[in-house]
Amino acid sequence: MSTISFMTSAQQHLKIGIIVIVIAVLGVLPLKAVAITPLTVRIADKPGVFITEFQTNGDSAAHEFIELYNSTDRDIVFSDPLVPATEQWKLQFFNSTAVKAGTPVWNTAATNSNSITLTGTISAHDYFLVSSNGYDPAGTVADQSYSPSSSHLMTDTGGALQLISQPVVADPTSIIAHDRVMWLAQASGVPLPTGVLASPAPGSSQQRLDNEDSEYTDSSQQISPFILRANITPLAAWLPIVEGSEDDAADPTQAGEDISLTAAGVASNNGLLLPVVNELLPNPASPLTDAADEYIELHNPNTVPFDLLGFSLEVGTTTLHTYTFTNSYELPAGGFVSFKSALTHLSLSNSGGQARLKNPVDEVISETAAYGTAAAGQSWALKDDVWRWTTTATPNAENNISEPAIGAASAAAIAKSTKTAATKTTSAKSATAKAKTTVKKATAKKASVKKVAKKKVKKPPVAKLATVATVKPKPPIHNGILVAVALVAVLYGLYEYRQDIANKFHERRANRGSRKQDRNLPEWR
């Protein structure tokens, strides 16, 4: 065989070999992804750290803060730079676009640039304040500061926060969600989605409520809701009473402590009768509109003005919406004032609902009877302690009942239901007397939280949050592909140096023939 023919044959065999190996690896062997744990966000079984207050706008748009509370019996180290293996806690920020589009993508928290890592320690039964750089809300120095950049900025338009922790070593792909909040600026006449809070006005905040047992969770095992407050309280909220402590033994009603201003609002209200809800207009007749002309009317039964600072209007029976008076507003003596939807952005349902007035410690002080379907132009009015429909709406004036034409049976049913509901209206109670019936919860607020006894307190029930979807990362390259690439590389090398290999092979073959001939010659002596 000639050298040229041998080389041609070798090249053909190399090409065929490469094709066969690639087909065998890629075609015959199935490509299976290596099994790995997908990136997940798991809801904490017993979350012990909550977001308890947040402000989106203080003296300026860049002034904001988040307050956290540790309800557990142990100190929690958020992260330790000297011990990288410890779990890391983070606050993740979402913008208004994510909230308006629906539920934010909560399970992107681990790697997004819009997360800040918390540092330091939050003590058991204590608070932790995180604020924007250079901002000391209400003169309170924050435990940690951050730069409110475009990805770490809470705006009045809306947004969301998520508190997460991630065990770095034990399970680096598992993220635990402890608490979440969402908020939006409420558009005129458009109710907020379920679970979304109203954006706090500049200078005010959204604050989480405590329940009757002084806990941040209620009997339905849900984390307590928030309420808009005119006055921010960073590191100054209620503290759970530790059994056996001095606080547990103390009873402010027995001690004669005057706490009436907490429930009554400003000092000028002390000793006054509380305002009452007097009339509703759920369905204004044309040319009036729902967005601008629905109203809730309040009546001041006192002979002096009553300041509504800190009080709030709430509407709804299942889904609740609130408007808080974050600035001083005086109801005139003996006056009737109608607060329209153009101001409050509260929407009264035409198919039925209820409205109530709450004091600054979130107690209902007056409420309407629940109403049914509202006819256009008819108001739901209180007269002689009975709620009824009237065809004569009287905004900013005493009610004048002109009952619509209905059957006698329907009228009797309305009278029966409204008389029962009217007993809930507290129009004749003084602010001082009302406040002293709930003193234990009101006086539980303190100016400092650094001196809390670290004895055993009630553990909060399990908080149920929405199930979160998982995000599966792209699978790694299959080992078979790597083997195929390596074989192709080897075969390419053989092909590239085919001339040298063929010459070497030819040389070895010629030498082998010469040695064979030499063996047939007589030995030289």
Image (cartoon, rainbow, N blue to C red):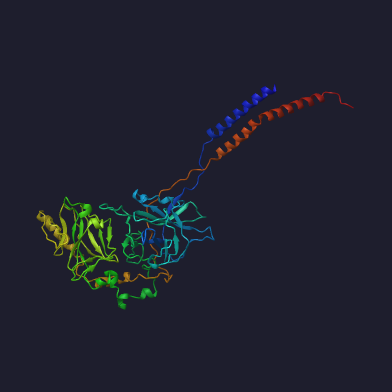
Dividing the picture into quarters, in which one does residue 299 lie?
bottom left
Q: Residue furthest right?
A: 525
Q: Position of residue 412 (x, y in %)?
A: 12, 58
Dividing the picture into quarters, in which one does residue 438 lie?
bottom left
90 to 335, vertically: above or below: above
38 to 50, vertically: above or below: above
Q: Is residue 60 rendered to the left or right of residue 384?
A: right
Q: Nearer the viewer, residue 325 or 193?
A: 325
Q: How many marks?
A: 0
Q: Residue furthest front?
A: 60
Dividing the picture into quarters, in which one does residue 302 lie?
bottom left
On-image quarter of the N terminus = top right
Q: Residue furthest bottom?
A: 255
Q: Is residue 154 visible?
A: yes
Q: Position of residue 108 (x, y in %)?
A: 43, 50
Q: Position of residue 104 (x, y in %)?
A: 38, 50
Q: Nearer the viewer, residue 236 or 397?
A: 397
Q: Is residue 125 visible?
A: no
On-image quarter of the C terminus = top right
Q: Nearer the viewer, residue 482 or 243?
A: 482
Q: Position of residue 515 (x, y in %)?
A: 79, 26
Q: Is residue 187 rendered to the left or right of residue 281?
A: right
